[in-house]
């Protein structure tokens, strides 16, 4: 009786409202997936509903907890963030980009990591003994750039302070020439402090900490001066400064100065020296990087790329040199699969961040930003990369579970890269994620209800008949059960139940 009273307008309103609600859910789910890489409904279900419904099995042995902790520690170590060896200058490069475009190239997370690095490298426990060091210790903790710059000027009013010159060179100088001039002043002050602390380093733990701090300051200044020379076109001078620095401080590998040296040698097209550096640092016992792997691939591709042709190779087969070049490319792509799209200009570049995640999109941007010109200079190298890089993925069908030459690809790179890279950049994700079930479900539901609303609006009588027939069929089992219950139960009892 109730179904017969429903008009076509009711069905139009019902289907239209359903379509609108499912469409809004679909838009929100798609936005959440693009921003965070997961489904909101799925995340809520796993995080909140599953513990309420199923809980956690308390009978799980302690060994499994230990294994879980081990896997968590492995995940954290895989997602360690590193200082970008080729990071740009904030005042002379990053800020100029902001002035021109109005966009912030650095994220708060990235700048916060830099602040932690500065406090680690440029401060020590005895800084309170000298007024300038005490001022700079507070300056490195300041979040406001203008407050940091003011503190550096305040320290310089007392005496020449190397770390104050460093801060002004990094953040206040608006050109590379001004930056270099300030770093030269920092070198003069830092070298004096280093020599004094070197003589006193064995007099106690306090003096040893001061010497370690002064060593970090001196290495940082010399390296940034070499980078200034490289940016100003004095590449041979930059190479000499980097070589001298690596000889003087061979144990400070944490700065990865060899990556600066490789880029400068490639600019000079001194491929023999590049190979010599790779022979030292491309070792199985040393951590890899995109610079190491892709530079090795570039050198091997250089030997065959000018004459390489896919058609000719398919007819005559690959030579030994071509096989070596392709294997080197596959090795590089397995280490960081994001790089080829930037080198082949399939994806736009942005300014590299101050920190990178190895094997992540941030490292790929940092590498391609400085090395794309070197690949273009080698004739046919990008063509060889274009023809062969896709073959890597056939060798590692399940990259998150098992690698070929490296460990399985870490699953945490997307999350870390989203923190390191600005919002206007579309983070490269590997391996590509399939759309979550709830996005597909809401898309289908929205389309289906919208189609029903349209058909009901266009053919109200016909759709009303179909709706009534569908609902009658849907409620037929219930009506059948009710009839059976009426026939079994006494009429008086059934009358009392219906009254209740």
Image (cartoon, rainbow, N blue to C red):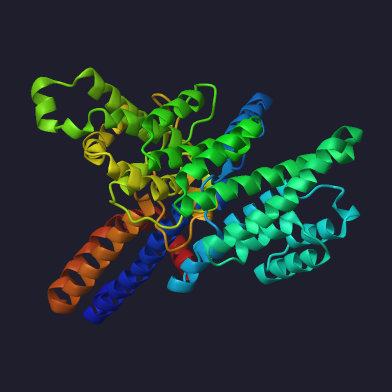
- Residue 25 visible in the snapshot: yes
User: Residue at image x 67%, y 34%?
Assistant: 58
Tell which of 12 and 468 is nearer to you: 12
User: Residue at image x 41%, y 65%?
Assistant: 28
Work out whether 439 lies above or below 409. below
Left or right, 287 with respect to 485, comes to right
Tell which of 460 and 442 is nearer to you: 442
Work out whether 310 lies above or below 49. above
Report the number of discs.
Answer: 0
- Residue 397 visible in the snapshot: no
> Which quadrant of the structure image shows residue 310?
top left
Position of the N terminus, as image quadrant, is bottom left
Q: In x, y percent, where is residue 231?
A: 47, 53
> Which quadrant of the structure image shows residue 318?
top left
Left or right, 144 with respect to 351, comes to right
User: Residue at image x 71%, y 51%?
Assistant: 188
Tell which of 48 and 462 is nearer to you: 48
Q: In x, y percent, where is residue 207?
A: 87, 40
> Which quadrant of the structure image shows residue 311?
top left
């Amino acid at each position: 009786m109730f179904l017969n009273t429903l008009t076509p307008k009711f069905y139009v309103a019902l289907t239209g409202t359903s379509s609108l609600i499912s469409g809004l859910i679909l838009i929100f789910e798609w936005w959440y997936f693009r921003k965070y890489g997961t489904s909101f409904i799925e995340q809520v279900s796993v995080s909140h509903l599953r513990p309420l419904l199923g809980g956690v099995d308390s009978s799980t042995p302690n060994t499994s907890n230990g294994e879980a902790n081990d896997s968590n520690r492995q995940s954290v170590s895989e997602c360690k963030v590193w200082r970008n060896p080729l990071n740009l200058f904030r005042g002379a490069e990053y800020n100029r980009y902001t002035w021109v475009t109005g966009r912030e190239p650095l994220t708060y997370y990235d700048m916060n990591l830099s602040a932690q690095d500065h406090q680690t490298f440029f401060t020590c426990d005895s800084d309170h003994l000298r007024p300038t060091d005490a001022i700079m210790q507070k300056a490195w903790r300041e979040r406001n750039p203008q407050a940091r710059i003011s503190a550096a000027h305040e320290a310089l009013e007392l005496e020449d302070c190397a770390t104050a010159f460093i801060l002004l060179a990094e953040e206040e100088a608006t050109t590379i020439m001004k930056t270099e001039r300030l770093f030269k002043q920092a070198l003069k002050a830092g070298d004096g402090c280093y020599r004094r602390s070197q003589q006193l380093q064995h007099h106690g733990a306090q003096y040893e900490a001061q010497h370690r701090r002064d060593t970090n300051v001196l290495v940082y200044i010399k390296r940034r001066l070499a980078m200034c020379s490289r940016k100003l076109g004095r590449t041979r001078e930059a190479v000499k400064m980097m070589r001298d620095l690596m000889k003087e401080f061979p144990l400070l590998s944490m700065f990865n100065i060899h990556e600066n040296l490789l880029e400068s040698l490639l600019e000079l097209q001194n491929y023999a020296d590049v190979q010599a550096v790779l022979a030292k640092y491309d070792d199985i016992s040393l951590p890899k990087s995109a610079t190491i792997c892709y530079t090795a691939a570039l050198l091997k591709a250089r030997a065959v790329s000018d004459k390489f042709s896919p058609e000719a190779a398919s007819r005559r087969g690959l030579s030994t040199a071509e096989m070596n070049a392709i294997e080197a490319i596959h090795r590089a792509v397995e280490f960081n699969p994001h790089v080829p799209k930037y080198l082949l200009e399939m994806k736009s570049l942005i300014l590299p961040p101050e920190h990178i995640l190895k094997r992540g999109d941030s490292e790929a941007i940092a590498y391609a930003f400085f090395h794309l010109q070197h690949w273009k200079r080698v004739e046919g190298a990008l063509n060889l990369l274009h023809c062969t890089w896709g073959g890597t993925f056939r060798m590692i069908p399940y990259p998150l579970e098992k690698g070929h030459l490296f460990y399985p690809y870490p699953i945490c790179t997307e999350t870390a890269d989203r923190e390191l890279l600005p919002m206007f950049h579309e983070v490269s994700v590997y391996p590509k994620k399939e759309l979550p079930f709830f996005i597909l479900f809401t898309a289908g539901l929205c389309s289906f209800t919208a189609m029903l609303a349209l058909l009901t609006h266009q053919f109200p009588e016909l759709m009303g008949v179909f709706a009534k027939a569908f609902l009658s069929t849907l409620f037929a089992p219930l009506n059948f059960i009710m009839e059976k219950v009426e026939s079994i139960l006494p009429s008086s009892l059934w009358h009392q139940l219906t009254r209740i």
